[in-house]
Amino acid sequence: MVAPKEQLRYDGRVVVVTGAGAGLGREYALLFASRGAKVVVNDLGGNFHGQGKSNAADKVVEEIRAAGGVAVADYNSVVEGDKIIQTALESFGRIDVLVNNAGILRDRSVARISDEDWNLIHDVHLKGSFLTTRAAWPVMKKQNYGRIIMTSSNSGVYGNFGQANYSAAKLGLVGLANTVAIEGAKNNIHCNVIVPTAASRMTEGILPEILFNELKPKLIAPVVAYLCHESCDDTGAIIESAAGWATKVHFVRGKGCVLRTAIDEDVSPEYVQQVWNRVTDMSEARHLNAIGEASLSLVGVLEKLRDGQNNENSVTETFRYGFKDAILYALGVGASVSDPTDLKFLYENNPDFGVLPTFFILPGLLAVMGSSLTASAIKHTTFDLTNILHGEQYIELFEAPATEGILTTTSTVLDVVDKKSGALVITQSDSYDEQGTLIARNQSSTFVVGAGNFNGKTKAGPEVKPLVPNPKRSPDASVEVSTHKDQAAVYRLSGDLNPMHIDPSFSAIAGYKVPILHGLCTMGVSVKAVLKQFGGDDPALFRAAKVRFSKPVLPGQTLRVDMWKEPNNRVCFRTVVVETNTEVLSGAYVDFKQIVIKPNMTSAVTLQSDAVFAGIKDRVAENEAKAKAINAVFLYKITSGGKVAKEWVLDLKNAKVYEGPAQGKADTTMTIADADMLELALGKLQPQTAFMKGKLKITGNIMLAQKLAPLLKTEAKL
């Protein structure tokens, strides 16, 4: 332990300690005296039941004087607190510090506590502390200085069997201290509470021996001494201390739940039962520093009720996130350390560490999922999770979000559309940071199967962000991304716990043979690919995105994201499952603050087949017309060790041969091992044989591949 440069002193201060004949009180008195204070050692001299008398106070005074300190004894009961303070004034002319420490025990179960036991405990602990404080008050007020300690107990904070009288008095001291702190603030009178656990006459025989021996009162005395020093600014604090350890204790209040939807509506027991889990939820609990905060909070609730804001169509939730949440989300949408550019989303100490933009869909999503917004918008029928489909999603970021923080999200029902086969409920969620700045806006369209035909509006209003059809031309870029079997299991840990994505029996009820991938996971994978291709892999350049979830994806399937660069920094895209050629995200787009296209990086890996493609490049250059006559784009995926090591693109529409990835959509994709590609070019392996033996895999237009035979044959550069 490092000793402070200057010792805390109490020279010129007068300290009164009640119950100072032994235990904690004795340690307080000795410590204050050793630091220069003049001490009044008060002790009636009885046992811990409050019976009998002794010269305990005199013994402590003798110890102090023997050590060169100044002290006097006082033998009055704390129920005559004015006499104790008078001793201080007559002996030393002032009082600066009052430590209300005196206490006794009369333990009985609730049914066996007599009036005498109840009254005596309250007289000594609660009333005695009040009377002594009241007597010291005018002196402290006049000198504009005072430090007061109330002694509570864990029995008061938590309760304890057989101590109803003691517990009630000890918690009462907390309330007394809070008020004394408030009233004394303008006169520099501080009042704090100590909650000690120490070995004493009162705890001997109650605590286990191993614990009793470590609960030395002298380990608590320095905490009380500091609270009473002029340098300590704390007031109204509850400090628990034991065995050389201390902490602050305070009461917290949960966020709570409004039990009515309008100012003129009554509360029913049935509704209380329905929302009881929200009433008792302490996940967003906070400490209130004053009764005014509680009153102000209640006024805010009433104002919202009066204005019709706190109804079934609006909900406000708090979303806390840190780097672990951001990393887990990134893993859920396919980020991998195998791609070095993904490290910025997976490692919190990376100098460019950032959060993927679609992560900020979560605050609104979780707020809506945890509320009754959708149910409140559809009152004509009932439904459950198996009837709900995510139709569309829009996200817009107004500011670059921090990598950790707290967002407050208000979600409202924006529109309800009658789609005949179901109802489309559109919610809008606005997320604000702690400074009140709008960070993100989300619009979620939830399709409730079977809830249509309610004679509602058939088109969404203009405030709902529309989809954008894809351009009628070949994509400017296409990227394939493989999902994995455990993708939904990982993604759901970010908050969307719908069992449809993990529980086979539940997904079967919903009509799926196996659990499907979250639509928002597919969106996250796709937007990440667009960000890498046209956003410089920089989340700060992202502005907004919108998608329609047209078909489900199964974990393990391969996604192809086709992209079109459009004016005004917009990239339209669609996502297709490669194995089934099924479009799963439609009418989608990403808006950027700026389009950034990274140049293709030539792979450092050298393969045998590189010479084959060099030869093809030469032949295409020598006869562009013949190459263009094939009028197709071929993508070769060359594998080594079972993994794709390099991609080559034969863009015979434009007579170009280059190392991939493809800048547009490939008509035919061929996957082949490096050595087999060389054998194919040398004529040692026939294309048909390679295909039949599984050495050559072809997707897309297989017939076009037959036109490549003349280009593949080579003699040079091998």
Image (spheres, grey):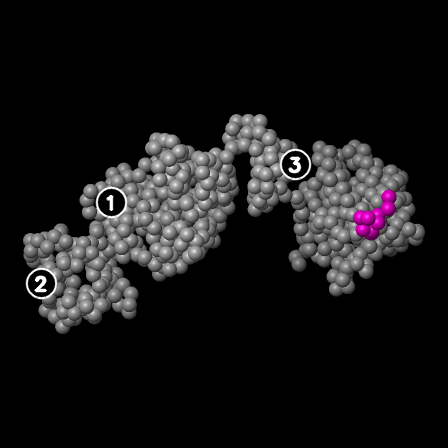
Is disc 3 placed on a helix, strand or loop? Answer: loop
Task: Out of 305 and 71, give the one closest to the viewer.
Answer: 305
Q: Residue at x 39, y 45 (%)?
A: 389
In terms of depth relative to the viewer, which is nearer, 4 or 675? 675
| Picture residue at 60% right of the left edge, 33% below the top | 267
Q: Position of residue 362 (x, y in %)?
A: 44, 45
The part of the chain drawn in magenta is 107-115
Up-down relation of residue 336 to residue 357 (above or below): below
Magenta-drawn stretch contains 515: no
| Type of amino acid at the residue the image marks with label 1 | Trp
Numbered disc in front, either 3 or 1: 1
Measured in 3D between alpha carbons, the distance from the residue under mark 1 to the one under mark 2, in whole angstroms, is 32 Å
Mark 2 element type: helix
Residue 112 falls inside the magenta stretch? yes
Circle 2 residue = 710
Quadrant where the image shows the N terminus: bottom right
**Residue at which label 1 appears:** 564
Which numbered circle lies on residue 428? none
Task: Evaluate whether residue 78 shows in this view.
Answer: no
N-terminal label among 3 and 1: 3
Tell me, for residue 290, which label it has, or none: 3
The residue nearer to you, when weighing 288 against 334, is 334
* Distance from Cα at disc 3 to Cα at disc 1: 57 Å
Q: Is residue 518 left or right of residue 608?
A: right
